[in-house]
Image (cartoon, grey):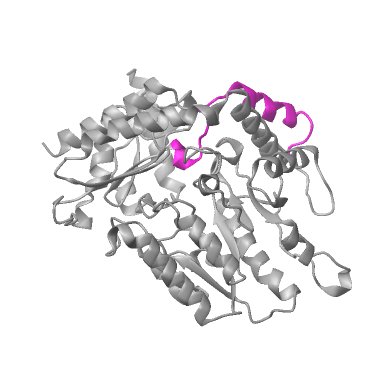
Amino acid sequence: MRENDFHNAQRLIERDKACLWHPFTPMKQWLEGGEEPGRVIVAGEGFELIDARGRRFIDGFGSLWCNLHGHRVAEIDEAVRSQLNRIAHSTLLGHASPPSIELAERLVRLSPAGLEKVFYSDSGATAVEVALKMAYQFYRNRGQTNRRRFLALGQSYHGDTIGSVSLGGIDTFHSIFQPLLFPATFVDSPNPYHHPAGRRAGEVVLQQADEALAAAAGEYCAVIVEPLVQGAAGILTHPPGFLKGLRELTKKHDVLLIADEVATGFCATGRLFACEHEGVSPDLMCLGKRLTGGYLPVAATLATQEIFDAFYGEISEGRTFYHGHTFTGNALGCAAAVASIDRIESTGLVEKLPEKVRLVSRRLAELKDHPHVGDVRQCGLMIGIELVADRETKKPFNPLDRIGAKVCLAARKRGAIIRPLGDVVVLMPAPAMDHDTLDTLLTITIETIHEYFA
């Protein structure tokens, strides 16, 4: 490393510490050097991140689960530049724009059957917020004013707005805001490793949901679920058939099903959308993160024609959905998303996913007998390796020891950037990552875990 590179990196860190407040970051630790210094990312190339000192790292967490094709993808870069030569942004309030139309057409074509209308926002949390308000107003517009309740899974995460936090079940993130939240009904997470019922977890949780919906018939708007896997809870995978069973329950009790595919959508689970694995068509579906390939903040809430029709009427009827965002349907973001979807199709990415999923499964099997690996969870390319003090008893480490964070820091020294969720080491590689890079990422992770506990 050249001396001026080192000093430049140090200066960037100093400037950062002087004025920036980082998300989900203990700032005392950050400011006092508790984290490795110098993590200023100045560039990306392919599936690597490059810091201010010129060091390269495999982007093992998809730049917070949103990178799809890698960094500096020529087709997406060109799409954004081309749109910039026309206009960067114009409002969709009473107007329209070609990129937003093109993206909406593609989303309707690719999404589960029945989702016909696209409402844009700018983050996964706002996409969920839109869905919640749509579900509530849908029934209100139909004269069912008693419907104002929602049901969610324990350990769920749907974003950080007050509405989405109200349906979140992770105490670390949500408990402090409890006095601000609207009440919601929670049933257990159906992950077999963390549920007392073990392999029967899915069946037990479906029964809980059935009983809750029946006990307050005519009062629920919707059930919301992260299909197949609860990401922020530590990649808590659901047993096969759970999502389909939940869909059947919502139909039985005449409530809407909201599928939060912000983390699971766009190839993360081995299909384009997680709902496809069980042939489920939700009433509302929330998208974000990889929607633009990880380039720009665009999110979308897709709705059925039936839901849209409930908002259709004369102004005097008061059916209008009075919700919106300044950058709704941003032209640059939509152009990036269109180019990203086109690249998914032109490269045959979805068809290539099963082989990558098998590679991950084969490599992760190397950890199955490790004395400090309690559980290895995988749903497609969403991977969670739960570290425990004792494999046999499932005894966890003391959270204050931050074992997961230390393992991820050790992996960084080997050339990969990954992030933990507590003591769960999470890998979320870009779905388009090539086999060699993916294999190297897995090797780094596996060897780091073995070395750390040696």
Q: Is residue 25 above or below residue 250?
A: above
Looking at the image, which residue is at 28% across and 59% down?
A: 198
Whether residue 131 can be seen here: yes
Front position in the image: 66 or 386: 386
For the image shown, how many numbered marks are present on the structure? 0
Front position in the image: 105 or 26: 105
Q: Is residue 183 above or below residue 280?
A: below
Instruction: Give the percent coordinates (x, y) of residue 76.
Output: 63, 27
Instruction: Give the percent coordinates (x, y) of residue 185.
Output: 47, 74
On the rendered image, what quadrant is the N terminus found in? top left
Instruction: Give the percent coordinates (x, y) of residue 232.
Output: 41, 52
> In the shown orientation, is residue 346 left or right of residue 392?
right
> In the shown orientation, is residue 41 left or right of residue 341?
left
Looking at the image, which residue is at 55% across and 60% down?
A: 247
Q: Verify whether residue 328 appears in magenta.
A: no
State the extent of the magenta-drawn residues as a range. 62-88
On the rendered image, what quadrant is the C terminus found in? top left
Q: Verify whether residue 69 appears in magenta.
A: yes
Q: Is residue 41 above or below residue 329?
A: above
Whether residue 183 can be seen here: no
Name the image quarter holding residue 161: bottom right
Q: Residue furthest left?
A: 454
Name the image quarter holding residue 260: bottom right
Looking at the image, which residue is at 37% across and 49% down?
A: 235
Front position in the image: 77 or 210: 210
Q: Is residue 312 above or below residue 123?
A: below
Instruction: Give the percent coordinates (x, y) of residue 410.
Output: 24, 35
